[in-house]
Image (cartoon, coloured by chain):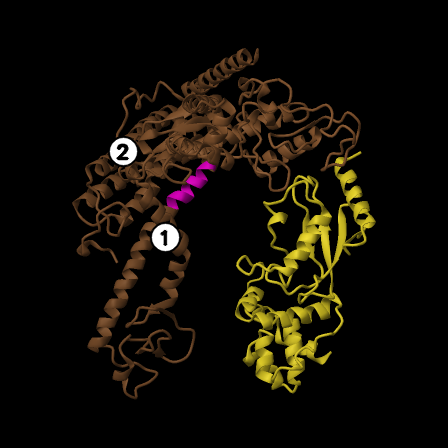
Chain colours: A yellow, B brown
């Protein structure tokens, strides 16, 4: 039997047998080399309560070349692209070793969520937010976890802070919020939409105003 | 042990191979020569030529072996360890010996080697058996049965648990099945171009010695071994400043040019070298045999993979950078913009009135006369102050700045023109080949006798290359008698090349062939001489320190303020 197929089969069945870690690997289509990994957000972090889905592509030369992984679930994290889900992690590149498995890699992703590396960012905007305002960053990360990763709303998002602070916490520009507020939308809703679309930095030029108004009208 | 003998055989094999390739290369060279053209006769080196030697891969490997042997003798280690240490230290023998004497275990740890302690079982095998040369001996550390006898061995990578599975491991004793080792090494070598390959275990720093790599590839991936050897040779070459790998696609030759190994030497010579091969390996016999069989010329001192004589690397690089940055933009700037008379920012007027306010320095001026706006009073929209002194001064500054742009474009256009012609010469080659066939049919000339056409095309091509770079040189040369002489030589060469090109484009009629042949042959000799004069003169100029630049060039004195071009 093909060594790669045997190895992947074994990895999938091993993962099924283990129920304690909460890590799951499933098939997406008929191919055993295109998989869906799921893991719970680590406890005690902004990602707690969320369920994170990862797209797993197993290259032909696996396990001698690293597996290709990216987040399907949108994650607000310095080392994960907020747009594409691409991940910056050493073991997915040059620190890969053939003895690492899909499961151990997913565990590494889980621990990456615990310990961001803002000095080696995948998403510079998010990393900037992390460095300038850790609490603001965590607020947004928690919010994204709720919106995209299905966490229960256990932290009142943006209900405690005053107007100005709320904008700062969301990592947004006051001018942007004012601009849409002037169109007659409530401030909270504007902040909500802008932070969900990650309307900051160079993203501003990529997201059209019509798109935002569309979101606001939903 | 018979290993030593085996290795010696291998050594001689390599040498034979090397000699063989050299002979071939020489033969090729002979073919190109023709009795009509004995200009380059004599082995004496011209001032514009740089002494260099072409080495085949086998020859490079021999140099590597010699260095390993020397290091091995000094350090008293075995060959494999010496090789890994040298690779770890980028082949810097002096530093290696120094650090090894200082703290051997620290160095061997860093280099991914564990030296077996004398009583340990790993050194039971004679040290000599670990050789960096190919050998057919069995895998080191091969274990027919797994280390734990009671449990069946399962390869941690492919999960194969077949009984009697052959496994192997490095000195760290991480055991994996042989199939996985082969696949791993092959993937590292083929996909990643890696020659310093660590153990598969996570975080393990032990590096696979050459004999292990060879033994693991031997059975299922023998074709990957030569690739590994090539990577080793490339690494050695890249660490040695007097060696350079031929950059032409598919070529595995190396050129040794000790005369150009230091940065300072590049200030006075242009080390154009050739690895001796021509064309693309494996395609020599294609239909466009002339076109593909170009000599593998490249510059030893910089990444330009063609002959950039007569201009030195620093200046050539400066020119390339300027062209990449400026040429297209400069054309556009010239036709669409003016500069602010105060801060010289370039401004495009895209509408509106003539009252300009510079975005950068807030200077207000008139677009028409370039004079300050404050002098204009109320006569907006129509400037009637053309003779104002301030305006004249501003226009002077403007025209100076325009002049420098014009000057650049003058040189650039000529440079680009020759580059374009060189590209078109591929076409010309094909056309010439057709003409040569035609000639053989319409006249009594033999194949050997029509070679003059080919030689002429090659010569014209070569001279255009020289001409192209003379424009880069002239752009940066500071004004004076030397530059004038240089430009005289340049003009004579250019004139001669154009005449030759014209002759080559002429239609062939059977009754004029003998005259044409005479004319082309004469012109080729003349052009070749003119080319030599340009190259000779510039090369001597560099050696005498005759050339002065109008900009700062690294390694030269700063130009006189009066000579500054800008």
Chief secondary structure of the magenta portion: helix
State whether residue B525 is above or below residue B9: below
Give the residue pinned by disc 1. B322
Q: Chain of mark 2?
A: B
Q: Chain of mark 1?
A: B
Task: Tell which circle, 1 or 2, labels the residue nearer the N-terminal end.
Answer: 1
State whether residue B446 is above or below residue B367: above
Query: Does any portion of residue B51 appear in the rendered image?
Result: yes
Foreground residue among B283 and A119: A119
Residue A61 location, quadrant:
top right
Q: Measured from the top left, where is residue B411 in percent x and y?
A: 32, 50
Foreground residue among A132 and B342: A132
Q: Measured from the top left, where is residue B82 in percent x and y?
A: 47, 26
* Quadrant (top left/top right/bottom left/bottom right) for the N terminus of chain B: top right
Q: What is the magenta range?
A: B417-426
Q: CA distance from mark 1 to mark 2?
A: 28 Å
On screen, residue A139 versus residue B352, left or right, reads right
Q: Residues within 10 Å of mark 2 (few under 14, many from 20)?
A: many
- Give the label, 1 or 2, closer to the camera: 1
Give the residue pinned by disc 2. B530
On screen, residue B309 versus residue A133, left or right, reads left
Q: Residues within 10 Å of mark 1 (few under 14, many from 20)?
A: few
Q: Measured from the top left, where is residue B281 in percent x and y?
A: 53, 27
SS type, badge 2: helix
SS type, badge 1: helix
Q: Measured from the top left, where is residue A186 in percent x and y?
A: 66, 85
């Amino acid at each position: 039997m093909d060594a790669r197929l045997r190895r992947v089969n074994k990895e999938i069945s091993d993962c099924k047998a283990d129920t304690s870690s909460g890590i799951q690997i499933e098939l997406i289509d008929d191919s055993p080399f295109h998989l869906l990994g799921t893991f719970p957000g680590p406890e005690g972090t902004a990602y707690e309560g969320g369920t994170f889905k990862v797209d797993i592509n197993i290259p032909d030369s696996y396990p001698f070349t690293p597996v290709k992984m990216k987040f399907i679930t949108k994650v607000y994290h310095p080392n994960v692209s907020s747009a594409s889900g691409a991940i910056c992690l050493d073991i997915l590149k040059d620190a890969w070793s053939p003895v690492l498995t899909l499961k151990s890699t997913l565990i590494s992703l889980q621990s990456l969520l615990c310990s961001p590396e803002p000095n080696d960012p995948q998403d510079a905007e998010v990393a900037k937010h992390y460095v300038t305002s850790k609490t603001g960053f965590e607020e947004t990360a928690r919010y994204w976890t709720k919106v995209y990763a299905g966490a229960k709303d256990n932290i009142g998002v943006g209900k405690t802070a005053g107007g100005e602070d709320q904008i700062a916490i969301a990592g947004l520009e006051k001018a942007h919020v004012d601009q849409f507020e002037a169109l007659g939308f409530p401030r909270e809703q504007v902040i909500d939409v802008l932070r969900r679309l990650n309307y900051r930095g160079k993203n501003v030029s990529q997201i059209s105003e019509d798109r935002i108004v569309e979101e606001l009208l939903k | 042990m018979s290993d030593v003998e085996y290795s010696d055989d291998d050594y001689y094999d390599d040498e034979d191979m090397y000699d063989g390739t050299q002979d071939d290369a020489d033969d090729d060279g002979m073919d190109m020569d023709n009795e009509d053209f004995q200009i380059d006769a004599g082995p004496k080196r011209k001032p514009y030529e740089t002494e260099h030697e072409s080495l085949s891969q086998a020859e490079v490997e021999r140099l590597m072996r010699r260095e390993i042997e020397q290091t091995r003798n000094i350090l008293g280690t075995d060959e494999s360890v010496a090789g890994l240490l040298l690779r770890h230290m980028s082949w810097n023998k002096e530093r290696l010996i120094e650090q090894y004497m200082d703290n051997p275990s620290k160095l061997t740890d860093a280099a991914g080697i564990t030296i077996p302690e004398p009583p340990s079982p790993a050194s039971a095998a004679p040290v000599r058996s670990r050789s960096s040369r190919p050998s057919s001996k069995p895998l080191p550390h091969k274990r027919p049965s797994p280390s734990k006898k009671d449990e069946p061995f399962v390869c941690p990578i492919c999960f194969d648990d077949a009984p009697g599975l052959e496994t192997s491991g490095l000195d760290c004793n991480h055991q994996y099945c042989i199939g996985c080792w082969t696949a791993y090494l092959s993937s590292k070598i083929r996909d990643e171009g890696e020659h310093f390959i660590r153990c598969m275990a996570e975080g393990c720093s032990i590096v696979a010695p050459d004999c292990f790599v060879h033994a693991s590839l031997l059975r299922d991936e023998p074709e990957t071994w030569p690739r590994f050897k090539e990577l080793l040779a490339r690494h050695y070459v890249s660490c040695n400043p007097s060696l350079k790998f031929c950059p032409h696609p598919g070529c595995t030759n190396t050129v040794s040019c000790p005369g150009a190994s230091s940065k300072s030497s590049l200030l006075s010579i242009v080390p154009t070298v050739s690895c001796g091969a021509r064309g693309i390996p494996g395609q020599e016999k294609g239909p466009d045999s002339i076109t593909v069989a170009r000599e593998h010329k490249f510059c030893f001192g910089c990444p330009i993979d063609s002959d950039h004589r007569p201009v030195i690397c620093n200046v050539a690089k400066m020119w390339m950078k300027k062209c990449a940055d400026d040429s297209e933009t400069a054309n556009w700037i010239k036709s669409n913009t003016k500069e602010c008379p105060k801060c010289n920012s370039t401004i495009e007027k895209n509408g509106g009135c003539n009252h300009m306010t510079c975005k950068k320095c807030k200077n207000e001026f008139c677009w028409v006369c370039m004079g300050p706006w404050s002098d204009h009073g109320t006569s907006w929209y129509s400037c009637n102050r053309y003779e104002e002194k301030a305006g004249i001064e501003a226009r002077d500054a403007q025209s100076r700045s325009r002049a420098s742009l014009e000057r650049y474009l003058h040189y650039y256009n000529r440079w680009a023109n020759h580059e374009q012609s060189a590209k078109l010469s591929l076409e010309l080659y094909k056309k010439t080949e057709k003409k040569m066939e035609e000639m053989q049919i319409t006249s009594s000339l033999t194949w050997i006798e029509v070679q003059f056409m080919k030689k002429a095309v090659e010569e014209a091509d070569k001279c255009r290359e020289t001409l192209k770079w003379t424009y880069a040189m002239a752009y940066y040369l500071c004004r004076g008698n030397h530059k004038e002489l240089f430009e005289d030589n340049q003009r004579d060469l250019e004139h001669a090349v154009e005449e030759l090109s014209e002759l080559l484009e002429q239609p062939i009629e059977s009754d004029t062939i003998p005259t044409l042949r005479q004319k082309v042959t004469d012109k080729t000799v003349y052009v070749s001489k003119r080319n030599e004069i340009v190259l000779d003169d510039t090369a001597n100029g560099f050696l005498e320190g005759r050339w002065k630049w109008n900009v700062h060039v690294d390694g030269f004195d700063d130009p006189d303020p009066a000579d500054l071009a800008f």
